[in-house]
Image (cartoon, grey):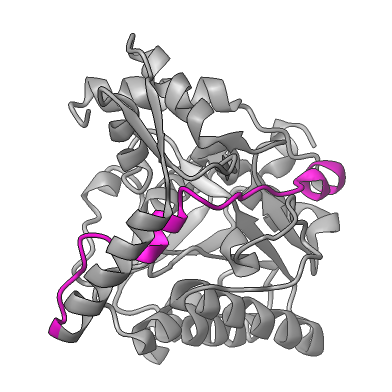
Amino acid sequence: MDEQEDRIPAGAKVLVTGATGFTGARLVRRLAAQGCVVRAIARHTANAGALQDVPVQWFRGDVFDHAVVRAATAGVQYVFHVAAAYRVSGLPDDEYRRVHVTSTELLAEAALRQPDFRRFVHVSTVGVHGHVAQPPASEASPFNPGDIYQQTKAEAELWLHEFARGQGLPYAVIRPAAIYGPGDRRLLKIFKLAIQPFFILLGRSQGLYHLVHVEDLLQGLLLAAVHPAAQGEAFICGNPAAVTLERMGRIIAGALGRTCRVVRLPAWPVFLAADLCEAVCKPLHIAPPLYRRRVAFFTKDRSFDTRKIRDRLGFRPRYTDEEGLAMTARWYQEHHWL
């Protein structure tokens, strides 16, 4: 598909959940620029200041609130379900389930009732595959979620597949790799580590990490909304290949004129310290300063086969890892985040 073919028709009514988040805000801006009539659901506490110059009809409230969903979906033709609770410290399991599962059920059921509905684009995660013993994983790899975030994202996606196929809801699923780009805070810690005097890595694994620049992800989401071959399918959206954490560190440091000095330490003592932190902090309802999942980030390989979205939808990433990481590092520096 060329650049024009991933466009939703001007004037179409589109609903975006998670519209004030890193990906959602950029999607709202892109849709508005293409002439869509954009609606958005955001919590009362969410800051929509970054979108104050964009024409958006806001529906304030929870994405799992029946009344909010009913009002926001009335007459829409497309839904992008981007909202997620991403491993928020202290968030109860029930809240993950409401944000991921209940919201998906309500939105899909409401979309089905709209007379001119075109497509429901559900944003899942490659995390539904959990730990991949033999990378790269593909869309056909089994689900193996490892925490409540991944578990509830998997539940939501599985429910949607069954519901949509049984009820005839037009839909597609995008499972993004690790999303990054200027303005992102989730991977900022890696950029900060890369410019330290020593870039500490744990264990001896390759430390494969699969990335997708946020602007490339937007292309994938829009293709999923309009491409005939996307109907009823799930797609892993990411760059053609994974990158190692060591390579990431060297790209980031090099972009800022620094030298990346890699030091590898054994992982088991850090895992032991993480277990101790969690054992002490959790009964006291204190967020542990170190926990097993954070340590495992450095010891697992996350690599995915992304040929399906390229072959079937014509997805072509604009940003290589080198270009995207360097650009993001310079943005962080210019905005004094590094």
Q: Position of residue 107 (x, y in %)?
A: 54, 80
- Residue pushed farthest top? 257
* Residue drawn where x is 47% and y is 82% of the image: 103
Please give the count of numbered marks on the rendered protein. 0
Q: Position of residue 36 (x, y in %)?
A: 53, 51
Left or right of residue 312: residue 73? left
Visible residue check, residue 320: yes
Q: Which of the pair 167/233 is nearer the observer?
A: 233
Q: Quadrant of the N terminus?
A: top right
Tell me where the magenta segment starts and ends, as one range. 284-312
* Residue drawn where x is 52% and y is 72% of the image: 150
* Residue drawn where x is 19% and y is 86% of the image: 283
Q: Is residue 294 magenta?
A: yes
Q: Is residue 110 magenta?
A: no
Query: Residue 185's quadrant in the figure?
Result: top left
Q: Which of the pair 117/80 is nearer the observer?
A: 80
Q: Quadrant of the C terminus?
A: top left
Q: Position of residue 189 (x, y in %)?
A: 31, 41
Left or right of residue 17: residue 145? right
Q: Position of residue 290 (x, y in %)?
A: 26, 60
Visible residue check, residue 319: no
Relative to 254, residue 204 above or below: below
Query: Residue 320's quadrant in the figure?
Result: top right
Relative to 322, residue 213 above or below: below
